[in-house]
Amino acid sequence: MATRRVASAVSAAAKAADPPSGTQVLLSTLPFLLMLAVACVDVLAGPGAGFLPLLSLGPALAAVSIRPVRTILIGLLAMLVCLGLASYDDLVASRRELIALATIAGVTAAGAIASAARRRREQELADVTAVAEAAQRVLLRPVPAQVGPAQVAVRYISAAAAARIGGDIYDVAEVGDAVRLIIGDVQGKGLGAVKTAAAVLGAFREAAYDTPDLPRLAERIELSLMRQTEGEEFVTSILAQISADGLRAEILNCGHPPPLLVGGSRASFVQPREAGLPFGLAGLASAERHTVQDVALCPGDRLLFYTDGISEARDRAGSFYSIEACATTFDGLDAETVLDRISKDVVRHVGHPLFDDAALLLVASGPDGSA
């Protein structure tokens, strides 16, 4: 009950803060315009045309967007208009008038019931969305623009229509003078993916500060995932560490798409020397994860980490989005603007909202990382 009250308060505050849209105003006024049009046509056509039952379209349309009480009031207004037109057409107490009044009353009652059911569903959806947004803020916390020696920007694009939460994860931690980060993609969707995401992020946030290196950090995450899940989930991920001077990066790739290194006019993928298994599948490997890549960075270099919602985005012809080609958008722009452009470019390439969650994490090295 407390969760529901909090969710209701959040959704109510959001509604109060947002002014009515043009569509909402149109839907609210359309029943009145429609009844006015029916009245005008009936007056012009005369008593023989029989337009009175069409006044029931007013309360019927009101049920689509208006509260039950207002739907009933619009139905009563339609009945009053019907009585006036019946008097004008000399149809008072006639069979046609009674049929028209009965039709309006029936449609109004059905509309009020439908409106109440719609309002209940809307409130349930608002509650679910508010709770999902709160969970999203807990799982994927805001990342500051400056973390130690690195400038950082993130973007998350959810494919969920009703709730902004999915299976892609990221986080950044300042460890001493260095920076450690994680980005990953959880197998599957729904609550199972959220549980797995929470286990991985929780383990990273706990272990990032006291493990000596990335392989030991990967072991801690793997162990935590085994303890908290049923053993069927896996997470492709990258663990990375930026040195205190911002001129060196260590990258441990666990079955994830390789990051893109952009510096000046050059762009190249940081391909792992050995294929690493995702978290959750360590039992299939004969040896522990230990292959950490050292990447030299120059001031102004940028590392773009992403999930497969970006790299596997296809257009209508089946062509994948080119991560490497998007490096041309980096020139002279700050990190936030770069990710804004990439996000829009991906959606433009696909031609519709993404069907898979997508995350972007951009790290700029050194004091000149703002480009």
Image: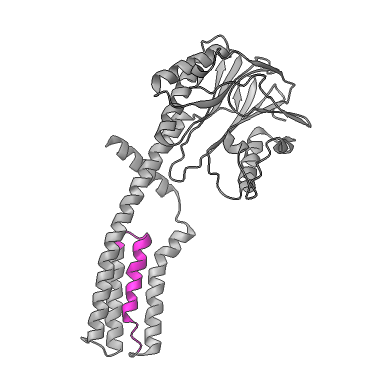
Residue located farthest toward the top when viewing the structure as drawn: 212
Residue drawn at point x = 72 percent, y = 30 percent: 371
Q: Where in the figure is residue 252, as x and y percent of width and height?
A: 60, 19
Q: Nearer the viewer, residue 134 or 184?
A: 184
Q: Quadrant of the N terminus?
A: top left
Q: Nearer the viewer, residue 357 or 361?
A: 357
Is 161 a magenta residue?
no
What span is colored magenta in the figure?
A: 49-70
- State the predominant SS element of the stretch in magenta: helix
Q: Where in the figure is residue 88, as x and y percent of width and height?
A: 30, 88
Q: Nearer the viewer, residue 71 or 195?
A: 195
Q: Is residue 38 above or below residue 72?
A: below
Residue located farthest toward the right when viewing the structure as drawn: 265
Residue drawn at point x = 43 percent, y = 45 percent: 162
Q: Where in the figure is residue 305, as x and y percent of width and height?
A: 62, 29
Q: Quadrant of residue 344?
A: top right
